[in-house]
């Protein structure tokens, strides 16, 4: 019985050493395979046989072949991958935004604004001609439109990248669900599906690079994958992710949602999270600041230009704003007046003067047009029912002797002087003339459509350089006012000037870009450190596996010798018998 037991012991050693050689060889073969986790053979002594006062061993048994992995470290690594991917994506986009803004070069908005206001400053000394001022205004408008277009192009690229990466994430969630099913089936008998688990871990790491996820392993070997507190994968079922598009009428925004019911997902990290942050907190914010700056530039310049004049007054002018038919009789401050409500600037309670002159006789008269936009009715109640409408302004203008006014088929206000008369505007405390586009320099409402009024492009002599102040003509009054806008504090910009507003915008982008680069570098260091820690646990060392291979080889040779010796003894015993 002892010899047969010795053979069984040798046999168990042969089997375990064969498996050990296979495991070591497999590790060496996959030493450079991405996503491979080192496998280890776990052995334990077989239950001994009690014989009297002592116990004899009965060989070795194979407990398991398992991956060497630290799940807590894996979770930290996935979080590190998400953070690095987010920061790196954000840093790349911020670099693109800085390149578009191009500050500290000779081709930036600060330079264009400085040149524009500088040209008006030269016009105060009657150095720059009206055509030069108009050309510079047109150059500024083209530059602003081009910058906004470039920013919008970056935004469009971000939207496209979000779409592509969400589709990839949806595919990976489905892969994880499929692998869950395969792993649960393969591990029913108690074995560990090492290769399938490696594939699932690789899918989870790629998912982590796209969005912040958490994975919770279940008793059957499957993992539930969540984004925030929302489960995406449960067992063999993936609820999927998708993109939904929302529009505010001018801008389309991509939102990451749950595939089954469209619930928004709280994606805050990974490359998708970085793209969302770059779009919402940086690109959109910078476009908004550029639009705000441009809208205020248009309105403030137009307020001065609309009340400007030259030695020769206006013979006619057409308002640039096309007022919808239904809005012509509605108060300018009514919420129902969609034409005015859609403007980024709005008129307020006040009024303006109309100066009508007869150049031949020198006779002139001044008439005030009240613009009632106080939001209070005649009986003292809150409401806009009897406030001033565009038609009210037209009627008041038309009633002035020497000029006529009407609204044309395009919804624009037309004002013309009678034969032998000319006119101009002054002291507009309401901003109504600028809002209605009467005698303005710029057209448009923001950075996307700012332009110089076409009639000025055709005839720059219509540019207003002077203005009436206290009834006296100041030949460079409008030029002085517009040149001072560069550094004048403006309430609508938070009490800072146009130049300071853009300077702050540039500094904000530069600061965010610097922070993004720092975070990206830090994220890379953290991720590399975590990968190094994982490699020390899960990585394959060829030297170590070579030693294991030699050990298993010696074990195999020893086991074979045990069997050979037991066989010889058995043959001898049989021969004696």
Image (cartoon, grey):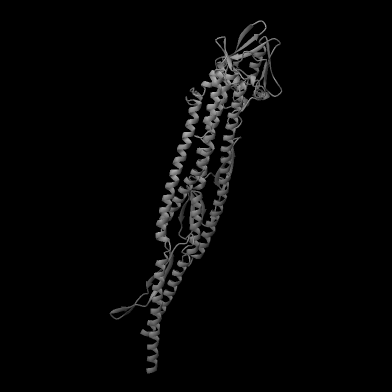
Q: Is 23 left, or right, of 164 in this rendering?
A: left
- Most extreme residue toward the bottom is 576
User: Who's the residue at 31% across and 78% down the image?
Assistant: 55
Q: Quadrant of residue 13?
A: bottom left
Judge whether residue 374 can be spotted in this image: no
For residue 54, above or below residue 105: below
- Most extreme residue toward the front is 127
Residue 285 screen position, x and y as percent: 52, 35
Q: Is 262 left, or right, of 192 in this rendering?
A: right
Q: Quadrant of the N terminus?
A: bottom left
For residue 114, above or below residue 93: above
User: Who's the residue at 48% across and 28% down the image?
Assistant: 500
For residue 419, above or below residue 142: above
- From the viewer's side, name the closer residue of 73 and 553: 553
- From the viewer's side, name the closer residue of 577 and 18: 18
Judge whether residue 355 can be spotted in this image: yes
Q: How many marks?
A: 0
Residue 79 screen position, x and y as percent: 44, 50
Residue 199 screen position, x and y as percent: 50, 60
User: Who's the residue at 49% across and 53% down the image?
Assistant: 225
- From the viewer's side, name the closer residue of 62 and 360: 360
Q: Quadrant of the C terminus?
A: bottom left
Residue 420 screen position, x and y as percent: 70, 9
Q: Quadrant of residue 553?
A: bottom left
For residue 274, above or below residue 147: below
Q: Is 357 left, or right, of 227 in this rendering?
A: right
Q: Quadrant of residue 339?
A: top right
């Amino acid at each position: 019985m002892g010899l047969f037991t010795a053979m069984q012991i040798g046999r168990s050693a042969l089997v375990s050493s064969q498996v050990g050689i296979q495991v070591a060889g497999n590790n060496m073969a996959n030493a450079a395979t991405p996503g491979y986790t080192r496998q280890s053979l776990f052995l334990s002594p077989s239950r001994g046989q009690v014989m009297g006062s002592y116990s004899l061993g009965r060989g070795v048994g194979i407990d398991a072949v398992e991956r060497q992995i630290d799940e807590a470290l894996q979770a930290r690594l996935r979080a590190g991958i998400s953070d690095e991917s987010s920061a790196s994506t954000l840093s790349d986009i911020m670099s693109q935004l800085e390149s578009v803004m191009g500050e500290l070069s000779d081709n930036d908005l600060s330079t264009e604004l400085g040149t524009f206001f500088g040209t008006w400053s030269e016009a105060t000394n009657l150095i720059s001609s009206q055509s030069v001022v108009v050309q510079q205004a047109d150059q500024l408008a083209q530059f602003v439109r081009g910058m906004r277009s470039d920013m919008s192009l970056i935004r469009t690229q971000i939207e496209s990248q979000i779409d592509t990466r969400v589709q990839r994430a949806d595919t990976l969630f489905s892969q994880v669900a499929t692998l869950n099913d395969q792993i649960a089936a393969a591990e029913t008998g108690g074995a560990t599906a090492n290769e399938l688990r490696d594939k699932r871990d690789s899918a989870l790491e790629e998912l982590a690079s796209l969005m912040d996820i958490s994975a919770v392993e279940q008793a059957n070997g499957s993992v539930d994958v969540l984004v925030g507190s929302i489960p995406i994968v449960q067992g063999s079922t993936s609820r999927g992710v998708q993109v939904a598009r929302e529009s505010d009428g001018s801008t389309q925004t991509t939102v990451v949602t749950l595939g089954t019911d469209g619930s928004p997902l709280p994606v805050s990290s990974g490359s998708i999270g970085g793209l969302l942050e770059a779009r919402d907190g940086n690109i959109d914010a910078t476009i908004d600041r550029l639009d705000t700056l441009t809208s205020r530039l248009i309105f403030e310049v137009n307020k001065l230009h609309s009340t400007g004049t030259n030695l020769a007054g206006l013979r006619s002018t057409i308002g640039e704003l096309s007022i919808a038919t239904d809005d012509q009789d509605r108060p300018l401050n009514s919420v129902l007046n969609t034409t005015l409500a859609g403007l980024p600037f709005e008129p307020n309670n006040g009024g303006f003067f109309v100066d009508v002159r007869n150049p031949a006789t020198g006779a002139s008269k001044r008439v005030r047009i009240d613009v009632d936009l106080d939001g209070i009715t005649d009986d003292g109640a809150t409401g806009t029912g009897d406030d001033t409408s565009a038609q009210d302004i037209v009627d008041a203008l038309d009633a002035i002797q020497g000029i006529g006014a009407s609204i044309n088929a395009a919804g624009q206000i037309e004002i013309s002087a009678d034969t032998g008369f000319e006119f101009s505007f002054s002291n507009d405390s309401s901003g109504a003339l600028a809002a209605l586009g009467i005698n303005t320099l710029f057209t448009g409402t923001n950075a996307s459509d700012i332009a110089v009024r076409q009639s000025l492009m055709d005839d720059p002599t219509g540019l207003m350089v002077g203005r009436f102040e206290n009834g006296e003509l100041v030949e460079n009054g409008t030029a002085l006012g517009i040149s001072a806008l560069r550094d004048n504090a403006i309430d609508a910009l938070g009490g800072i000037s146009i130049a300071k507003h853009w300077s702050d915008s540039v500094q904000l982008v530069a600061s965010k870009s610097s922070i993004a680069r720092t975070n990206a570098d830090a994220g890379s260091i953290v991720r590399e450190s975590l990968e190094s820690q994982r490699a020390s646990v899960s990585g394959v060392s060829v030297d170590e596996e070579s030693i294991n291979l030699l050990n298993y080889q010696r074990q195999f040779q020893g086991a074979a010798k045990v069997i050979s010796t037991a066989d010889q003894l058995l043959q001898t015993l049989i021969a004696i018998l």
